[in-house]
Structure formats: C-alpha cells, structure tokens
C-alpha cells in the first residue's frame, strides 16, 4: 500500500513539474511582437478596424492579457471621398484668406502714401491763400484779426449734408452668423469614435482544444464599464453567454450620431426633414444564444435564445428638429430613466418583449420584430414605436408643444391617448422611418377579426336590401342564390308585360281579351300581338328556378293555348300588370 502511494505521489509530482515547466517556458518564449502583428493584421483585413495594443502578456496556461487597447473603425470609401473633398475645401479657404489679407495690406499702404503726398501739395497753396486774405483785409481797414478768421474759415472744407444710411435688411444675428462662417474654415465630416479598452483578459481551455472543441472566456474593462462573455463552439452549434453593465453608449462604433425622421414632406417629396439628437446613457444587459453552424460559417438567420438590452439614465438631446413648415427649432434635453427590453429569438425572428421607454419627460413602448438573415446588415426591423411627452415637459418647452400641435403629419400620427406612432422598417444598414398612428404588429389579430365581422355585417345588410329590390340590371355576382326564386318571376312578368303584341296570323282569329271586356278590334292586335314562334324563344332566355318549373313546362306543352290565355293573368296573389292596357291604347 505504501509503495502504491509513493508511485502515485511520484507521478503526480512529475505532472505538476511538467505543467509548471511548460508554463514557464511558454511565458519566456512567447513571441509577443509576432502575436501583436498578427492581431493587427487580422483586425484590418477581416473587420476593417485599426488596432493598437500597448501591452500583451501571458496570463496562466492558455490565457493572455492585453492592456491599453485602442480600436478605431476604418472609414468607408464614401467617407474617404467626403473627407478628401472637405480637406480640399479647407485648403482653398486658407488660400483665399491669405490672398484677401495680402490685398488688404497693399491697399492700406498705398492709401497712406497717397494721402501724405496730397497733404504736401496742398500746404503751399494754403499759405498763399492766407497771405492774399490778409492783404485784402488791410486794404479794407480791418486789423487783421478778421483776416485771420476769414483765412481760417477759408481753410476749412465746406459742410456737406450727410446722406441717410441705407437700412440693412439682414438682422444682426444673420450677419454675425455669416461673418462667423467666413472666419471659420469649412467643417470636416465626423470621424469614427475610437474604443479604448483598459484591460482585456482572454482564456482558452487547452485540453478541450486538443479534442477539437473550443471553449473561451473574455473579461474586459472598457468604455467605463465591464463585460464578461463565455463562448463554446461544438461541431454543429456555437453557444454565447454573457452580461455587461455600465458601458457608455456614445462610445459604441454603431451608435447613431444623426437620426432622420420625416416630420412633414413637400408636395414634390424631395425634402427630408430630420431630427438631430444624441443619445447618452449606460448600456447594460445579458445574452444567451445558440447559433447553428454550417461548416465553419454561422447561420445568423436560425439563432435561438434571448437577448436583453437596456439603456439606464438615458438622456436624449439637446439638439434641433427641422420642419419644412416651421424651420429649425431647438429641443431641450429629454430625461428617461430606462430605455430597452428583451428580444426573443425563434423561427427566424427576434420578437420585442416588454420593450419600454420610461422617465419623467417621455414614456412609450416598442412592439414588433426583427426579421433575421444570414448577414447582420440585412436584418430587417419591422417594429412600431409610440411615445408621449409628459404634461410638465410640454408646459416647460413651448416649442415642442407648438410643433406637436402645428405639424399636420404629427397630428395624424397621434392616437386618442396622445401617443405619437413611428413605424420602423428597412434594414440595419438602411433604417427607414415613417410617422403612423396605427401599428400593424400590436393588434393584428383583433383587427382582422373586427374587419371580418364588419364585412359579414355589411354583406348581410346588402342581402337584406336586395330582398326588396328587383334584379333587373344587376350583375350576377351580386345576386344571392336564396333570393333568385323570388326575383325571377317578377323579372319575367315585367318583360312579358312590356313586350308589344305581334300582328295576327292569317286564318286565325284573335281571341285574347281582358276578363269582362269585349274582344279587341282587328286593327289593335295587328300592332301588339306577339308572334307564337318568337315568344317561346324569348322566354327561354330567363332560366326558371325550381319553383317555376311546372309553370314553364305548361307553357311549353300548349303554345297555342297560351295565345287564348288572357295576358293579364299572372301568379296567384299578384296584380295583373297588363290589365287595362287595351282601353288605354
């Protein structure tokens, strides 16, 4: 027993020694500079990020720690072109300013020289005029003082009436703004905000890595907060779990610096009024997702799990809102205690759950979903945001209250509870917004049932109205089968009553007459009697229903007897429509 224990301790000591030696030699021989260069190249080629690492060192077996990491997103080709144009404009502005300063300096020196020369030329002339004035004064008997005064008056220029200054139509603020714009160089487009990471620690399980599985963890202090994520990759799925808190949202690379929202539109539809407001706050949340793998490529459209995102102590603004009708007006800072909620990933959708806006100045919620795709930029939001300002906020900020009541597009997008609706569509790469009061996502089921019930009641009302109307001149699609039997006899009776009678056939006597009346004269039936050959064909055009079949068959069996039948005889209970026609005619 003692021998086995000694062997176990011996092999345990060997294992510990080997692991310690491996960690020591890895620490000494780790190519830190090569790893830095590899990470920088990887970030630039695959993620279009500029990476700068101050310190990199080994942290235990299979771990690495980085300090002083700066990540800066690289500009896109469009942003580079805009930056080049802005730099050229600034260069032209500097050259123009130098030329203007040089011209002003030359003009000032030339004016001073000309003024001095003119003064030297006028000096002898002035002395000669003074001498002549004194001599004339002595000849007139003056003592010379008057001559001095006259000479002084002669030397003074004549007073000229001042012309009134033309009033400048531009206000002082506009002129000050123009002068300030001339003095300042053209602005450069906003650059990407770099992300600074104070400390980042990454660890990999080496023994699991030998079996082909990857399990890693990342713990970082960045953007004023903390982030912890665990990643496990198998043969078919990638699992991501983690949480974060206190991250400054304005330092995120994808944080929008400008939001464009259509407030009102011009008749041509070319104007796109915009809202320019910044969002400030601390980001917190957690994630638990499973991503299916197709080979080594993740299938982002089939993600399942949950994601929670919240912005705590959020501040929106200050900024400006532009409207075609009202121009620019300032919006003060809007305070919100919390913005955010949860996202449930399933069936190729990320559905918003309990996504709300709460605070002293603003309240609202978001409903709908995000349509997933294999590319993150192609994810399409299909959501509806509604929000409402508090009464205290509107009392304090009269400009916002005036805009809400004055803009017709906002009035149409406001529901009876005072919430303004905003529909968000498009993709994450190109988000599109439109002011609308109703949400197609919040009450879609109840709205469909209401529409269905409304349609059924309308059709029922139409059917009730059709029971009291004739079907002559109506389309077959509007005739209901249940009412065909009651409509068709009336249509047949009307047609038969309005048909003129054909002339008599030679060799036959017209025996048709109204009940209780004398037989009609021979000249009358010649104009109104129906031809026996055409009458059955015309009646065959109207398709009889089941209630009319016996009557129609009787007409077919005795066509000649039908001539003897009085014209005014109709169905039982109906008034003969042809009664009294012979006397009237």
Image (cartoon, rainbow, N blue to C red):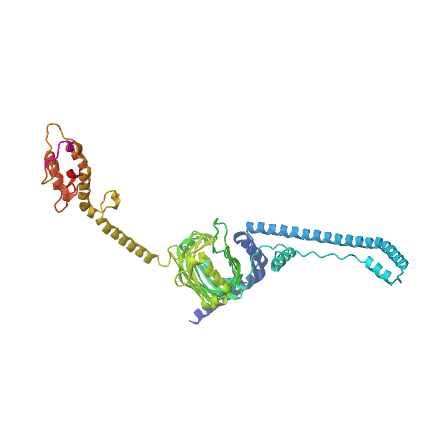
Relative to 218, is 157 on the left or the right?
right
| Residue 583 visible (yes or no) | yes
Image spot of residue 63 (x, y percent): 52, 62
What's the magenta region? 518-524
Image height of 579 relative to 378, above or below: above
Observer-nearest of 535 and 431: 535
Relative to 493, is 192 on the left or the right?
right
By secondary structure, the bulk of the magenta-drawn segment is best described as: loop
Residue ID at (77%, 56%): 158
Q: Quadrant of residue 192?
A: bottom right
Assess whether residue 522 is covered by the magenta stretch.
yes
Q: Quadrant of the N terminus?
A: bottom left
Image height of 580 relative to 175, above or below: above
Assess whether residue 165 is covered by the magenta stretch.
no
Residue ID at (73%, 53%): 104
Image spot of residue 205 (x, y percent): 47, 61
Image spot of residue 213 (x, y percent): 44, 58
């Amino acid at each position: 027993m003692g021998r086995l224990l000694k062997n176990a301790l011996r092999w345990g000591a060997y294992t510990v020694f080997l692991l310690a030696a491996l960690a020591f030699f890895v620490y000494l021989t780790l190519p830190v500079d090569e790893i830095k260069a590899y990470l920088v190249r990887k970030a630039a080629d695959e993620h279009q990020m500029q990476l700068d690492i101050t310190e990199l060192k080994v942290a235990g077996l299979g771990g690495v720690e980085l300090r002083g990491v700066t990540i800066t997103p690289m500009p896109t080709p469009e942003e580079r072109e805009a930056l080049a144009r802005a730099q050229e404009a600034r260069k032209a502005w500097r050259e123009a300013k130098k030329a203007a300063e040089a011209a002003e300096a030359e003009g000032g020196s030339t004016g001073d020289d000309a003024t001095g020369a003119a003064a030297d030329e006028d000096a002898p002339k002035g002395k000669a005029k003074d001498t002549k004035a004194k001599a004339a004064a002595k000849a007139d008997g003056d003592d010379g003082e008057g001559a001095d005064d006259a000479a002084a008056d002669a030397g003074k220029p004549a007073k000229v009436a001042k012309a009134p200054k033309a009033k400048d139509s531009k206000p002082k603020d506009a002129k000050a703004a123009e002068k300030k714009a001339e003095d300042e160089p053209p602005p450069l487009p906003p650059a990407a905000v770099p992300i600074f990471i104070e400390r980042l620690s990454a660890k990999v399980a080496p023994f699991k890595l030998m079996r082909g599985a990857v399990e890693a963890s990342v713990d970082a202090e960045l953007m004023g907060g903390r982030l912890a994520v665990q990643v496990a990759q198998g043969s078919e799925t990638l699992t991501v779990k983690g949480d974060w808190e206190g991250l400054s949202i304005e330092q995120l690379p994808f944080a929008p610096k400008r939001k464009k929202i259509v407030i009102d539109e011009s008749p041509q539809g070319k104007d796109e009024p915009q809202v320019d407001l910044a969002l400030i706050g601390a980001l917190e949340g957690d994630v638990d997702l499973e991503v299916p793998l197709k080979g080594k490529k993740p299938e982002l459209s089939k993600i399942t799990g949950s994601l929670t995102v919240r912005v705590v102590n959020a501040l929106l603004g200050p900024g400006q809102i532009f409207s075609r009708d009202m121009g620019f007006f300032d919006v003060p800072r809007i305070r919100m205690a919390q913005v955010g909620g949860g996202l449930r990933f399933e069936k190729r959708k990320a559905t918003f759950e309990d996504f709300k806006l709460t605070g002293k100045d603003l309240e609202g919620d978001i409903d709908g979903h995000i349509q997933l795709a294999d590319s993150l930029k192609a994810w399409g939001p299909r959501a509806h945001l509604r929000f409402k300002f508090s009464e205290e906020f509107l009392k304090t900020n009269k400009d916002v209250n005036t805009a809400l009541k004055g803009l017709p597009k906002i009035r149409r997008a406001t529901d009876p509870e005072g919430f303004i609706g905003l529909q968000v569509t498009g993709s994450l790469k190109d988000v599109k917004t439109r002011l609308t009061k109703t949400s197609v996502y919040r009450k879609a089921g109840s709205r469909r049932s209401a529409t269905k019930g409304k349609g059924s009641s309308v059709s029922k009302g139409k059917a009730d109205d059709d029971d009291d109307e004739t079907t002559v001149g109506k389309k077959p699609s509007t005739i209901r089968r249940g009412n065909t039997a009651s409509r068709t006899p009336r249509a047949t009776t009307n047609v038969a009553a309005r048909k003129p009678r054909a002339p008599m056939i030679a060799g036959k006597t017209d025996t048709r007459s109204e009940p209780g009346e004398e037989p009609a004269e021979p000249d009358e039936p010649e104009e109104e009697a129906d031809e026996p050959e055409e009458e059955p064909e015309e009646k065959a055009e109207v398709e009889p229903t089941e209630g009319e079949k016996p009557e129609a068959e009787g007409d077919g069996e005795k066509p000649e007897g039908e001539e003897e039948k009085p014209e005014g005889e109709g169905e039982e209970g109906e008034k003969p429509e042809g009664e009294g026609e012979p006397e009237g005619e």
